Image: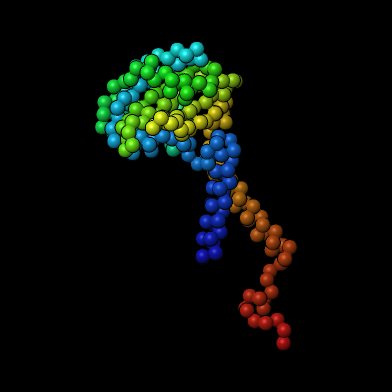
Amino acid sequence: MLNRAFVIFALVFISGLEASVFCYGLWGYFITPPSGAGVLAASRRLEALTYFTSDPNGTVELRPTPPIVPSEFIGCPLFDFEPRCLHDRLMAAVLTLPGDVSRTESVEALRPQIERACGLWASPRRGEAITVQGESGQMRLITCASGELSNDLFAYREVLFAQGEEQEVASIEYEVSGFESLTMPFFFSYLLPFNIGLYVIGRIAGKQWYGPPLPAAVSGLPTGR
């Protein structure tokens, strides 16, 4: 029984490891996409939530703040890296903080940091600037989703500005041509049956090649006299 449990555990572990490696090779993360939600949730207070659009010419405009509907978060699994789901994770963290979600900041004041976060792409961009008060002072997480960079290729980025420094939290490029479903759970669901099949084939082949164990080996008795 213990041997069977060990084999099952080993197959699950190996399949999960392989699926994580495939996911990292395709999207740049092993299991779940990186997110600044943890940083927001650990903060003390929300100071401002600013929605914006920008273009490569440096024009930055304010977008109306849409209502935050918690029930919408349920439709996004942790493995999904679509900008809508990444945004919903951030908003779920925002809702845990005291503060006014309708308060915004001047886009002119935010322009330098927005360009630092969004300036990698020569396409229209849209995102949010989420300003919070943390243990060490004010922090601002800027998210940015690009327009189409090339045929079916888009990008998403999160940059954290704190203490006069910037840190890239997430940077993902993805296609919307069907490959976006190839995440870690997808790879795992196919690799586990495949590895189980290899194991079964290996056991059958081993019995055919080497035959059954000798009776003495089974009983533990010596073979000589």
Please state the horizontal and vertical placement of residue 112, each as a whole percent of the image.
43, 20
Q: Name the residue furthest front.
A: 164
Nearer the observer, 35 or 17 = 35
* Residue 146 picture location, percent across and down: 50, 21
What residue is shown at x 53% (from left), y 20% (from top)?
121
Please report the residue visible at 51 percent of the width from the left and 31 percent of the height from the top. Answer: 171
Q: On the rendered structure, is 218 left or right of 55?
A: right
Which quarter shows the C terminus?
A: bottom right
Q: Is residue 197 above or below residue 60?
A: below
Q: Is residue 44 left or right of residue 1?
A: left
The front one of 104 and 96 is 104
Name the foreground residue: 87 vs 77.
87
In the displayed image of the protein, which residue is found farthest to the bottom?
225
Image coords of residue 15 (percent x, y): 56, 48
In this image, 196 relative to 52: left or right? right
Q: Residue furthest right?
A: 209
Residue 33 image position (x, y, % from top left): 48, 36
Q: Is residue 49 above or below residue 210?
A: above
Instruction: Judge whether residue 91 can be spotted in this image.
Output: no
The chosen color scheme is: rainbow
* Front-lying residue, 123 or 8: 123
Residue drawn where x is 70% and y is 81% of the image? 223
Which residue appears at 37% of the width and 28% of the height?
A: 140
